[in-house]
Image: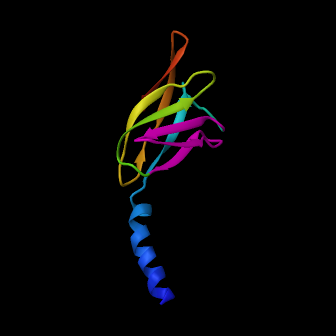
Amino acid sequence: MKTIILLMLFVVLLPVAASAGEIYGTIKEGTRLVGQGIKIEIASGGSIYSTETDKYGSYRLFVKERGKCQLRVLFGQQSPSIEIASYDRSVRYDLALEKKDGNYALRRE
């Protein structure tokens, strides 16, 4: 009986885990990678997902919702953002921080 209940729970919960879309990539400032500890947030629906870059300027997040999202990088005292999309499958967003008139902006590479 326990086996049947566990199997049913597994079957019910599997689609929730499988529907999460991975968003990953790197962030550069000019020609160099930003390095470790830069905070990244992705707002999707009513949820906010956050992570930090590793020593190579790479990041990786799993977003449950599909569709348009807002990716924000907390860099220095600024927080430039860019609109991205989340899918069922993995999607890579390599981004570059560009400084214009003292303010940073994000663009996709």
Q: Find the residue positioned furthest to the bottom.
A: 1
| Residue 70 image offset from top left, x and y in percent | 43, 34
Q: Residue 34, relative to residue 88: is it above or below?
A: above
Does the segment drawn in magenta span residue 48?
A: yes
| Residue 49 image offset from top left, x and y in percent | 52, 44
Residue at position x 60%, y 27% from top? 75
Residue at position x 61%, y 41% from top? 52
Question: How many numbered marks, from 0 up?
Answer: 0
Does residue 108 appear in this view?
no
Which scheme is used to colour this image of the protein? rainbow
Residue at position x 44%, y 86% from top? 4
Q: Find the residue positioned furthest to the top.
A: 101
Does residue 70 appear in this view?
yes
Does the segment drawn in magenta span residue 38?
A: yes
Q: Nearer the viewer, residue 46 or 102?
A: 46
Query: Splitting the image into 4 quarters, where does residue 32 fall?
Result: top right
Query: Splitting the image into 4 quarters, where does residue 39 fall?
Result: top right
Q: Nearer the viewer, residue 98 or 71?
A: 71
Q: Residue 55, relative to residue 73: is it above or below?
A: below
Could you tell whether 71 is left or right of 89 in the image?
Answer: right
Q: Nearer the viewer, residue 25 or 68?
A: 68
Q: What type of secondary structure mainly makes up the magenta span?
A: strand
| Residue 84 image offset from top left, x and y in percent | 38, 37
Could you tell whether 67 is left or right of 50 in the image?
Answer: left
Q: Find the residue positioned furthest to the left.
A: 67
Magenta stretch in the rendered image:
37-63
Q: Residue 56, relative to residue 32: is it above or below?
A: below
Q: Quadrant of the C terminus?
A: top left
